Image (cartoon, rainbow, N blue to C red):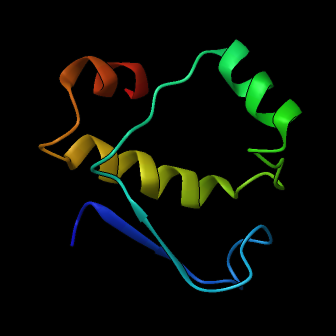
């Protein structure tokens, strides 16, 4: 599947098991919403993801027919 990115636990220190990122679904949050989630413990800070994995995720989001064009424009 072109819009899913498989990440092995050995590729990213923030994951403890193999994971798949569904790039058909994008959640937009503003900084206040993110701060609130961190403060409430609903969001945990993870190590920086390697650039090659971030690139794969962005490419998959850009290929998704389900992600609105205005979101894709933010990534290009």
Q: Position of residue 40 (x, y in %)?
A: 83, 35
Asked if residue 59 lies left or right of residue 14, the reply is: left
Indicate the quadrant where residue 37 lies: top right
Q: Is residue 2 above or below residue 66?
A: below
Q: Position of residue 30 (x, y in %)?
A: 60, 15
Kindly identify the residue that appears in the image at 20 percent across and 27 percent down.
Answer: 68
Kindly identify the residue that appears in the image at 23 percent across and 36 percent down.
Answer: 67
Q: Is residue 72 above or below residue 19?
A: above
Q: Is residue 34 above or below residue 47?
A: above
Kindly identify the residue that appears in the image at 56 percent across and 51 percent down.
Answer: 54
Q: Is residue 55 above or below residue 26?
A: below
Q: Quadrant of the C terminus?
A: top left
Q: Quadrant of the N terminus?
A: bottom left
Asked if residue 48 lies left or right of residue 33, the reply is: right
Kindly identify the residue that appears in the image at 32 percent across and 23 percent down.
Answer: 71
Indicate the quadrant where residue 56 lies: bottom left
Q: Position of residue 53 (x, y in %)?
A: 56, 60
Q: Position of residue 29 (x, y in %)?
A: 55, 23
Residue at the left extreme, as displayed = 65
Asked if residue 12 lies left or right of residue 74, the reply is: right
Between 71 and 25, the residue placed more toward the observer is 25
Between 53 and 9, the residue placed more toward the observer is 9
Residue at the front extreme, as displayed = 40
């Amino acid at each position: 599947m072109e819009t899913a990115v498989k990440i092995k636990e050995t590729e990213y220190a923030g994951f403890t098991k193999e994971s798949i990122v569904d790039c058909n679904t994008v959640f937009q949050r503003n900084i206040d919403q993110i701060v609130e989630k961190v403060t409430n413990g609903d969001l945990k800070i993870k190590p920086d993801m390697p650039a090659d994995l971030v690139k794969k995720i962005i490419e998959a989001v850009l290929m998704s027919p389900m992600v609105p064009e205005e979101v894709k424009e933010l990534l290009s």
